[in-house]
Amino acid sequence: MSNLFRELEWRGLVYDATEGLSDALDRERVTAYIGFDPTASSLHVGSLMTVMPLARLQRFGHHAIAVVGGGTGMIGDPSGKSQERVLLSSEQVAANVAGVRRQLEQFLDFEVASNPARIVDNADWLGTIDVLSFLRDTGKHFTVNYMLQKESVNRRLESEEGISYTEFSYLVLQAYDFLQLFDRYGCTLQMGGSDQWGNITAGIDLIRKLRARKVHGLVWPLMKTASGAKFGKTEAGTVWLDPQRTSPFRFYQFWLNTDDQAASAYLKSFTFLDRSSIEELDSVTRSAPEKREAQRVLAREVTSMVHGRDLAARAEHASAVLFGEDIATLSASDVLSVFEDVPATDLAADLFESSGFGIVDLVAQVQLAPSKAEARRLVQSGGVYVNNRRVTDPHLRVTRADAIEGRLFVLRKGQKQNHVVRLA
């Protein structure tokens, strides 16, 4: 149990914490919780920033509780939001809770004898209280002045849209969650991102007033990309943990594309690698950044954790093929598995017989370029690849003999935009 707080500090996961938490984590087995908002049926890579500290806490011998917000999910947390969320139906929330629960089971150990993790749904208690009892027994401990001082509320009041009474009440509901977890499971620590500090301290104050006990809170900094954008968002949208929403290959690529400056922080936050391993990777990044060894290890570790070693190895192999020149040596089925989430076009095979299909026409046909004139310029500038080999001759004609197993081509524009042509 010792040194957990210092471990979190080294990993950059302590933005603020209540006084005495470090000592408490050293001297006793603490029960801690983190809440997960079921706004979707899958967690995303940004959620890992929340999942990993809870998993680390359990590995250090403490008790971990994951609270899936089936109750608060009906309201919506205003923290970090510039406008009110679209409220979900009870059926949508229930489906999302089930999906999030399944994913949390990948990271937390519910079988270990000494400190098994627990998943609970706050709808179990929030769904059974009546409004009058809640206002009388809990609401009276929160002054409006106190709530207005919270950043999540204050920021929304300054916006044009303001904040509804529904979301204004969220802080009290989350504080009540902490009280219930304290009473039911002896939970004395709530953790979360720095935008949750106001909600967490509200729960700490409620337990102090009603139970005369000191409990704790810990928050980590919100992670941003090198460009300052919200972590986990890409041009293609959110990177999900659900392989049906984001393929393991695309998931692997997300981590592989990490900027050199962020690689070390990501290794600390999103893997269980120890200090010496990460420091060694830092050294390699400084001496030989072109090897991108830290990014490769990061992608392998996180993809293995989320999707399993087999799919991680497959994604790693696919990545090597994607940027190599041996793609034509692979079977058509292997290539299709690598590019299963890449746009594809079916064309008649007889178009590629005899004299073949002009490369300029082909690039325009699959809309890698908006016009034939632009397709010609793209080819002449060396921006087009056929089966990973650059072509520069606008008069080139590709034939069925050039296709992988005579039935498909992989066209690429630049370094990242791929398109599969299947011959039917």
Image (tube, rainbow, N blue to C red):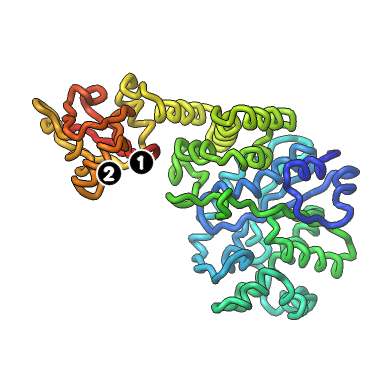
Instruction: Where is residue 256? Give x, y as percent.
Output: 52, 36
Label 2 to label 1: alpha-carbon separation: 8 Å
Question: Disc 2, disc 1: CB below 8 Å?
Answer: yes
- Circle number at residue 417: 1
Tell me the quadrant of the picture where the N terminus can be found.
top right
Q: Earlier in the sequence, mark 2 or mark 1?
A: 2
Q: What type is the residue that disc 2 sits on?
A: Leu
The residue identified by callout 2 is: 368
Q: Report whether 55 appears left or right of 30.
A: left
Identify the residue at image location x=56%, y=38%.
Answer: 306
Looking at the picture, tell me which residue is in the foreground, 175 or 227: 227
Label 1 element class: strand
Identify the residue at image location x=85%, y=69%.
Answer: 210
Instruction: Where is residue 75? Give x, y as percent.
Output: 59, 68
Label 2 element class: loop
Identify the residue at image location x=36%, y=23%.
Answer: 325
Tell me the quadrant of the picture where the C terminus can be found.
top left
Q: Is residue 161 above or below residue 246?
A: below
Looking at the picture, tell me which residue is in the foreground, 28 or 385: 385
Instruction: Where is residue 131? Give x, y as percent.
Output: 67, 77
Residue 302 seen by the camera = yes
Q: What type is the residue that disc 1 sits on?
A: Gln
- Circle number at residue 11: none
Q: Is residue 264 above or below residue 83?
A: above
